[in-house]
Image (spheres, rainbow, N blue to C red):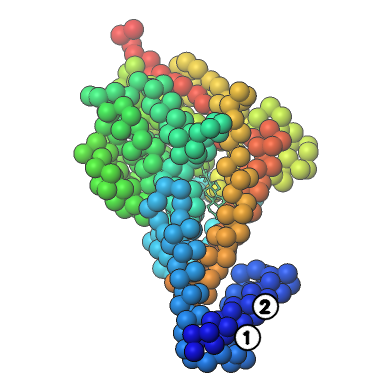
Amino acid sequence: MVLTTLSAIKHFALSLLAKSFLCLSVFDPSLSLSLSLKIAYREREMDSLSLFFTGSLIAFGLYWFVWIHGSAEQRGKSAADLSCGSISADKIGDKYTQYLSFFRRPKEIDTADRVPAFVDTFYNLVTDIYEWGWGQSFHFAPSHLGRTHRDATRAHEEFAADLISASPGTRILDVGCGVGGPMRAIAAHSGTRIVGITINEYQVSRARLHNKKSGLDGQCEVVCGNFLHMPFEDSSFDGAYAIEATCHAPSLEEVYAEIHRVLKPGGLYVTYEWVTTELYRPGNPDHVEIIQEIERGNALPGLRSYDQIADAARKVGFEVLREEDLARPPAGQWWSRLKMSRLAYWRNHVVVTVLAWLGIAPKGVVEVHDMLFNTADYLTRAGESGIFTPMHMVLCRKPDNRD
Ligand SMILES: C=C(CC[C@@H](C)[C@H]1CC[C@H]2C3=CC[C@H]4[C@H](C)[C@@H](O)CC[C@]4(C)[C@H]3CC[C@]12C)C(C)C
Ligand SMILES: C[S@@+](CC[C@H](N)C(=O)[O-])C[C@H]1O[C@@H](n2cnc3c(N)ncnc32)[C@H](O)[C@@H]1O
């Protein structure tokens, strides 16, 4: 009896595998498992007992693939919890289409007022996928030989904290804080108090949850709001930082002016900006395509050039103390993490497709994941060609009239 069941399982599993591979080579790989299951079931190749055992085996495999193997380096979000923020499941398709049509030609966006609302939609669509597939810090970091991505990410965050002299007794602003990965790392590293602001309500709830879980909610506070009009008093922060966030602003001067307003005289501000480098040629169609695709896949209303950042800071009254592309050698490649994850993307694609098919994840998640897959490719090309950096660092100071 046991032997019969085992051989039936083996037979079924082999036929399932063969059909999966057949489908894999012909169709979209994500369809292969579901199709094979259906075909095998229809053919009634086994009795109910072996079907039960095989079903359990597949269920366990799926469980391992999704919940155990398929979660981010930094745990917190599993594939089974993927949602699209505060967008209800039936509206995801529409919201995604609206997002894509708004960011079709980012350089030509003439309705700057509507940018923050579409950035908010973007983060409803991607926040869970980012957390699941990347971690709680939504930015890049120079890679370091022998260091994990997590350590490299932390080092990049702590560097920002040290540049603005974050320390116990100070109050620091995190401009565009995401779900608070950098905020918690900086609070733990420096002992400072941090207030983060993000346009996305869903991120606020995620960040608060993580702050509480990590026991840092006494030091870290999160506010929902637009960094172009911040709900903070003038001269109320000792320092501020923005990590890969102000690239979403339709006007850099506007957000820098707000940061300048809320900083105390003498306060320091550091930013890691997404910019095109001196190697970017607007007459080169490959360069134009890469940059346009990065803008589209990351809700950017037109990437700026590296030489526009310090100018914008000076224009609103900052002194510029230091300016440096942190991606330059000897820094390790920031895009290596994206390249190394290619196999993981395929695994993730299969996971989201199967979960959407089973009705566990909302359907639109698959399209959003495909968009990110595409953007990862263009970001890698941008890194390899050197035409773009996500870490053009500018350190500024609000002048103190008493100096
Ligand atoms: C600063 C910004 C975000 C930067 C990065 C955190 C994200 C940019 C592209 C994202 C990703 C691309 C591919 C995804 C992959 C297909 C999926 O399976 C798992 C998540 C990704 C790796 C995802 C993770 C976050 C990014 C690297 C912008 C918005 C200004
Ligand atoms: C790529 S994420 C970076 C998040 C965080 N700095 C980190 O490194 O994890 C960009 C962040 O900027 C925020 N953002 C974009 N436009 C904004 C705006 N107009 N007002 C407030 N936050 C904004 C997004 O909501 C998101 O949290």
Is residue 379 depicted above or below 86 in this figure? above
Toward the right, the furthest residue is 284
Q: Which residue is mark 1?
A: 39
Q: Give SS at disc 1.
A: helix
Q: Where on the picture, by quarter, is residue 316?
A: top left
Q: Residue at x 58, y 92 (%)?
A: 44
Is residue 163 depicted above or below 114 in this figure? above
Q: Where on the picture, by quarter, is residue 162?
A: top left
Q: Amino acid at mark 2?
A: Lys
Instruction: Estimate the x, y position of residue 102 in percent, counting from the top left.
Output: 57, 55
Badge 2 residue CB within 8 Å of ligand 1: no
The answer, for residue 133, to whether it is visible in the render is yes
Q: Nearer the viewer, residue 83 or 253?
A: 83
Q: Nearer the viewer, residue 117 or 186?
A: 186
Q: Amino acid at mark 1?
A: Ile
Q: Residue at x 44, y 59 (%)?
A: 68
Q: Residues within 10 Å of mark 1 (few under 14, many from 20)?
A: some
User: Residue 186 bears which disc, if any?
Assistant: none
Instruction: Estimate the x, y position of residue 292 in percent, counting from the top left.
Output: 66, 46
* In this rendering, position of residue 185 left or right of residue 18: left
Instruction: Estimate the x, y position of residue 240 in percent, counting from the top left.
Output: 37, 29
* In this rendering, position of residue 210 left or right of residue 313: left
Instruction: Estimate the x, y position of residue 169 in percent, counting from the top left.
Output: 23, 24
The answer, for residue 256, to whether it is visible in the render is no
Q: Are marks 1 and 2 in contact (CB under 8 Å)?
A: yes
Q: Give SS at disc 2.
A: helix
Q: Residue at x 61, y 69 (%)?
A: 30
Q: Which residue is mark 2?
A: 19
Q: Residue at x 61, y 23 (%)?
A: 330
